[in-house]
Amino acid sequence: DWNFTNKFRLLEAEQQSLSYNHHQAIASYDASITSARKSGFIHEQGLACEKAGFYHKRNGSVRKAMGYFKQALECYGEWGSSMKVKFIQGELNDVQMLANNELARRG
């Protein structure tokens, strides 16, 4: 259970995402993140956060996307992957630009 629950929950989240089951997708992403954290799989926690960030970005939830990407950045930094840190930093920059544009439109 400790070795595969987070993977199962992440696959479940992706499936729910494709089926447009918003609440179930979010619950499964969060369950995957929690399970990976409890099992000590920091890289898989980062992956679940990253995937949740992309999910929220696609759905226009910029602030939520930013929160998940920040968590992914921390995980990948702790894991020691400079390549993933750089990639996620680019996503954070993109999401920040989207947030700024959204604020500018609201005036």
Image (cartoon, rainbow, N blue to C red):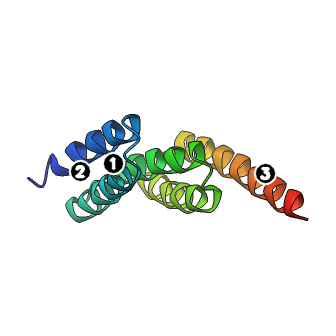
Q: What amino acid is labelled 3 in the image?
A: Met
Q: What amino acid is labelled 1 in the image?
A: Glu
Q: For the residue carrying disc 3, how many other residues have a C-alpha within 10 Å: few (<14), some (14-19), or many (20+)?
A: few
Tell me if 13 is positioned left or right of 87 in this view: left
- For the residues marked 2 and 3, what is the alpha-carbon distance in whole angstroms? 31 Å
Q: Earlier in the sequence, mark 1 or mark 3?
A: 1
In the displayed structure, 52 sits above or below 30; it is above
Question: Residue shown at 62%/50% (left/top)?
Answer: 60
- For the residues marked 1 and 3, what is the alpha-carbon distance in whole angstroms? 27 Å
Question: Residue shown at 32%/45% (left/top)?
Answer: 13
User: Under tag 1, what secondary structure?
Assistant: helix
Asked if the residue under mark 3 is in contact with the one under mark 1, i.e. CB atoms within 8 Å, the reply is: no
Q: Which residue is mark 2?
A: 6
Which residue is more in the foreground, 15 or 6? 15
Between disc 1 and disc 3, the foreground one is 3
In the displayed structure, 90 sits above or below 23; it is above
- For the residues marked 1 and 2, what is the alpha-carbon distance in whole angstroms? 8 Å
Q: What amino acid is labelled 2 in the image?
A: Asn
**Residue extending furthest toward the left:** 1
Q: Which residue is mark 1?
A: 44
Find residue 19 and report its horizontal and vertical position in percent: 36, 36
Between disc 1 and disc 2, the foreground one is 2
Tell me if 51 is positioned left or right of 103 in this view: left
Residue 104, by quadrant, is: bottom right
Find residue 96 and report its horizontal and vertical position in percent: 74, 55
Q: Which residue is mark 3?
A: 97
Q: For the residue carrying disc 1, how many other residues have a C-alpha within 10 Å: few (<14), some (14-19), or many (20+)?
A: many
